[in-house]
Each structure stands twice: as C-alpha cells, then as structure tokens.
Amino acid sequence: MHILLTGSTGFIGHTLQAALQRAGHTVHGGVSPRQRTLQPGQVPMDFARDTTATAWLPRLAGIDAVVNAVGVLHDTRARPIDAVHRDTPIALFDACAQAGVQRVVHISALGIEGSSTRYAQTKRAAEAHLQALAAQGKLRSAILRPSVVFGKGGDSSALFMNLARLPVALFPGPVLEARVQPVSVHDLAAAVVALLGPALQQTGTIDCTGPEALTMGAFIASLRQQLGHRPATVLRLPQPLTTLSAKLGDAVPQSPWCSETLAMLGSDNVGHPAAFEQLLGRKGVHYSQLVATAWR
C-alpha cells in the first residue's frame, strides 16, 4: 500500500515509518516545509497552516491509506495546538473523504476524556470529526489512544530515564501518584501495521497500553531497577514549586513537563488492553522489560 504518514520524523512517526516499510508498504513521509533537502518519499506539509481540505488533496493522489502521528504538548506560534491537533487533522480527514482514501489511522491519546486542557479538547475534536465521517460511510477509521509511550528518541522517555538515574530524586506529587500503563513504541507501531494489514477492516477506538498499570513514581523506580541501580531516595516537591516548575517548562517548547502535563496528571492514564493485544496477537511488553526492548 501507498501510505501517507504525517509526523514521520517525530518519535512515534519515525518508528511507524520503519515498521511500515519492513511490512512492505511504500511510505510517503510528512516533513516540515522548512526542511532544506527532501529525501525520496518525503512530502512537505505544515500542520500550522494546512487547515483546508484543498491543501491536502494533491498530497493524496495515489495514496491508499493515511496515518496521522502529529502531536504537540505546547501551544506555540510555530505549532499552535488548535491547528496541529484539531483544524489540520480535520482538513486532512475531509480531504481523505473527498479523495476516496478509505483507510485512516489516527494516533490520539489516552486520558483525554473529561479533561479540560486544550490538549485534550483539541484531541477530542479531531476524534469526533473522524468518527462522524466514518459513521457517514465516507471512510474506515481506527483511532489509537496510547498511554505513556516509551522508547528511544522520545522526550518523555529520556526525561524518565534521566530521573531514574538520580540517587536522590525530587518529584512533583502528581508524578508520584498518577497511574499510567506504559506502552512500547514498537508495540504501538506493530498495531498500526496490523491495522493496515490483517486488521484492515477493524474500526473504532482502541486503548493502546501495556499489560499492567502502576503509578508514575513506581514506573520510574522500575526503570531505575532495570538500569541496575539500587532504589533511590524520593522526595516530594511542594505544590507551589510544582506549579512553578510546570510554568518554567511552558517556556521550553520541547519540554515534556509543562502546565498541560501537570493538569493531565490529575487523572489516570490507564485503559483496557484487550483489543490492543488482539491486534498484536500477544500481550504488550511489560513495563519491567521496556529498557531492554524499547530503549535501543
């Protein structure tokens, strides 16, 4: 199949592209229009500005399926969250319906239900539009909602690994208490490959999680153990300093720690892995094995 993959140079997108190519697909990878030299198969696109279906129709010529793997945590002038999560995906989905591209796989996020953050609101809006198109029979959609995605190259994963190496760690309270269900980036990629192969007809929303949930603090402790270190001394950061640290993170566009992250940690990021495991044909990688299998 010829697959248009948005966000192909990002953490998740890069892994998806490699997995799709290994499965025999031809991937047309979306890259920034500011990239000076285009490699074969790369397609310039700008999620900050390509907010109309007309902008996407030429890119869909000869395309059999679309995978959207673009996402941001911060709202910035260069990457406004409303456009990146809502307006541009909606335009892309509308273009797919117009161009007859039936298969759309959309990478969303777990934990967005009931959240008032702009991250969650814009993610939900894109999901709702895609589901409406599918209900009208205009395309077949699969929405993947991963919990914390772990793997080499991920900003959050790198932060977790750096924290795991500290013999004395000072954590915000929500980081210690929030429940997550970490998933390997390679398992997420395997699910996308399945949805464009054996499970091509499968539709709906799928929670993408590891087999077991735990608190974020326990997850970081597990990473430390996997690295061969003794348990760390863990201290709790006072709430005022937690809020201040998140606001400081807002000023760093690539930082995975920011006010949006802090707000989202107020609710659990866990789900039901049965449908995900059915796609994989096995259980997902357990969090206790993530360093050995995904940190490479």
Image (cartoon, helix red, strand yellow):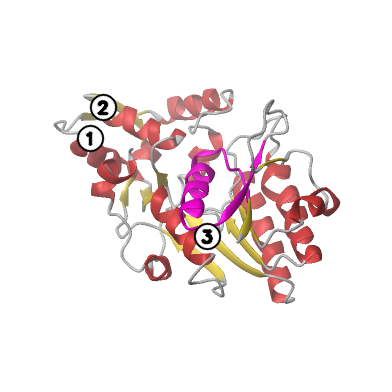
Q: Amino acid at mark 3?
A: Leu
Q: Secondary structure at mark 2?
A: loop
Q: Residues within 10 Å of mark 3 (few under 14, many from 20)?
A: many
Locate the C terminus and report the quarter of the image it occupies.
top left
Q: Check residue 28 for magenta coloring.
A: yes
Q: Earlier in the sequence, mark 2 or mark 3?
A: 3
> What residue lies at 73% left-to-right and 43% top-to-bottom?
83
For residue 13, above or below residue 244: below
Task: Read off the residue under disc 2.
Answer: 165
* Relative side of 147 to 211, left or right: right
Residue 18 is left or right of residue 73, and the answer is: left
Residue at the disc numbered 3: 144
Foreground residue among 19 and 211: 19
Secondary element at tag 3: strand
Between disc 1 and disc 2, whose residue precedes?
2
Q: Upstream in the sequence, badge 1 or badge 3?
A: 3
Three-letter code, disc 2: Arg
**Tag on residue 224?**
1
Q: Amino acid at mark 1?
A: Arg
Percent coordinates x, y for residue 106 in the rendering = 60, 57
Q: Position of residue 254 (x, y in %)?
A: 54, 28
> In this picture, which residue range is highlighted in magenta?
5-31
